Image (cartoon, rainbow, N blue to C red):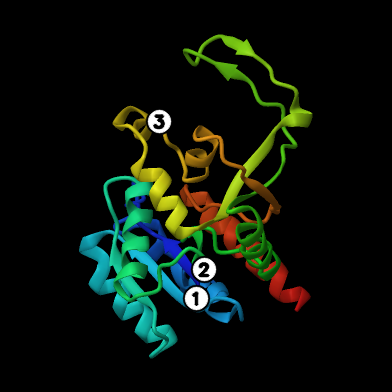
Amino acid sequence: MIYAAVLAGGTGTRMGADKPKQFLEFAGRPVIIHTTEHFLRHEQIDRVIVVTPEIWCGYTEQLMEEYFGDSGIIVVAGGETRNETLMNAIAAIEAEGGLDDDTVIVTHDAVRPFVTEEMISGNILAAQETGACETAFPSTDTILETDDGRLVKSVPDRSRLWMVQTPQSFRAKKLRELYRSLTEEEKSVLTDAARIYVMKGEPVAIVMGDSSNIKITYPDDIQIAESIWNRQHKQD
């Protein structure tokens, strides 16, 4: 089976709002609803899991029922870290008997509401063929490296740098096995699940992303999302 895991485990402290950023609205609906809808509509996705802070689980369930009715969405509580949150999603898959060697989990930030059908399809195919993949696109900016935030250490060749987005997708059982094999020190430096594969010498395929696949992080991003939504729907 193919599962989508919409990861909404963060509290959105940088947004400065009275609720996590995934519940803020643009174009008349919460961010998380815009995002989740893409996966519900995708014909290859069998089930959708939404992972949210424990204190917001009830509210999330109400939202899912309000907008999607009896859609079969599974809402589970997140963990202390992003990867623990992802492990909770895999545990939910196992609990309903859907976890085997072929199970694919397509993970996506709840605050990236402009994921496309092509990205999701590309992730599913890449995960089935390679075992793991992440969505990215070539960097258009020069990136510098620094140790202290004051002095430049190096300026890597931009032609070799890509900007990481989500979805990131995996064969779920293999991902859990690799995660469990990590030391606590290795877990402490993880920024995303794909890095687990890199650390263990496993291949990770790249699926082409897009500059419009933004992550809503700061207050101004809501206005940017409104602009993108209006532009896309004007074209429709």
Residue 143 seen in the figure: yes
User: Which residue position holds label 1?
Assistant: 28
Left or right relative to 129: residue 107: left
- Disc 3, SS: loop
Disc 2 vs disc 3: Cβ atoms closer than 8 Å? Answer: no
Q: N-terminal of the two: label 2 or label 3? A: 2
User: Which residue position holds label 3?
Assistant: 189
| Image coordinates for residue 47, horizontal then vertical, percent | 46, 77
Name the one closer to the observer, 71 or 61: 71
Q: Amino acid at mark 3?
A: Val
Q: N-terminal of the two: label 3 or label 1? A: 1
Q: Is residue 153 above or below residue 78?
A: above
Circle 3 or circle 1, nearest the eye: 3
The numbered dot on residue 35 is 2
Q: Amino acid at mark 2?
A: Thr
Disc 3 vs disc 1: Cβ atoms closer than 8 Å? Answer: no
Circle 2 or circle 3, nearest the eye: 3
| Image coordinates for residue 100, horizontal then vertical, percent | 44, 67
